[in-house]
Image (tube, grey):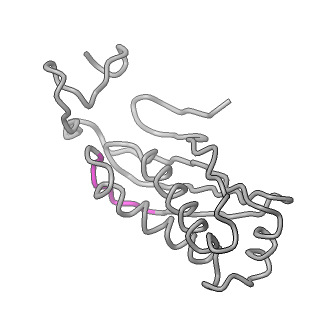
């Protein structure tokens, strides 16, 4: 059963996991944007914004972690295809009093989409923020990891409501 018929493409007729064969699909421009939010104490957000974290530049390190994660998604998620990424952009912005919003946009010219790369990027960036300031705020929460939009491919465009 195909994905457009409501089937799950990562399972064969016997229900076993499989990597989808995308060899017959055309290469098209594809883009995906995902988001995540790290909720923390206001004092922790101020520490990050003011560059006073003991481990260094939290936002810069988290941005690099997200980019690296996007590039290595196929190594982390078993059935993902390795994709030649043309861009991985991460934006981290404070949303006072207690939130850091992370957004990643990933682009490629490939036979399959980059949704997983964008989602992996924001997830690892959020985990990096947690790691870098956990000594002062172990109660932080990572919330709202989701796909915001995607374009390209046979399934067309998607925008979250």
Answer left or right for 152 relative to 63. Answer: left
Q: Quadrant for residue 62, please give it.
A: bottom right
Q: Is residue 93 magenta?
A: no
- Residue 131, image x, y percentages: 55, 70
Q: Is residue 81 magenta?
A: yes
Where does the magenta region start and end? 80-86
- Depth check: give the residue in front, 97 or 88: 97
Location of the N terminus (image quadrant): top left
Answer left or right for 11 relative to 46. Answer: left
Q: Is residue 95 above or below residue 48?
A: above
- The residue positioned 58% from the left and 40% from the top of the image is 149
Location of the C terminus (image quadrant): top right
- The residue positioned 50% from the left and 61% from the top of the image is 124
Q: Is the magenta stretch mostly helix, strand or loop?
A: loop
Q: Quadrant for residue 44, please give it.
A: bottom right
- The residue positioned 67% from the left and 56% from the top of the image is 38
Q: Is residue 107 above or below residue 14?
A: below
Q: Is residue 80 above or below residue 100?
A: above
Count numbered badges in the picture.
0
- The residue positioned 26% from the left and 47% from the top of the image is 78
């Amino acid at each position: 059963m195909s994905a457009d018929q409501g089937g799950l493409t990562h399972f064969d007729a016997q229900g076993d996991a499989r990597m989808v064969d995308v060899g017959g699909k055309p290469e098209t421009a594809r883009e995906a944007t995902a988001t995540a939010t790290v909720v923390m104490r206001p004092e922790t957000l101020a520490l990050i914004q003011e560059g006073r974290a003991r481990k260094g530049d939290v936002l810069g390190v988290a941005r690099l972690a997200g980019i690296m994660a996007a590039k290595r998604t196929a190594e982390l998620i078993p059935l993902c295809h390795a994709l030649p990424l043309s861009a991985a952009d991460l934006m981290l912005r404070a949303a006072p009093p207690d939130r850091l919003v992370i957004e990643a946009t990933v682009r490629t010219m490939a036979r399959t989409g980059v949704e997983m790369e964008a989602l992996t990027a924001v997830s690892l960036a959020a985990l990096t923020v947690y790691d870098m300031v956990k000594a002062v705020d172990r109660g932080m929460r990572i919330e709202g990891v989701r796909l915001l939009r995607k374009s390209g491919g046979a399934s067309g465009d998607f925008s979250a409501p």
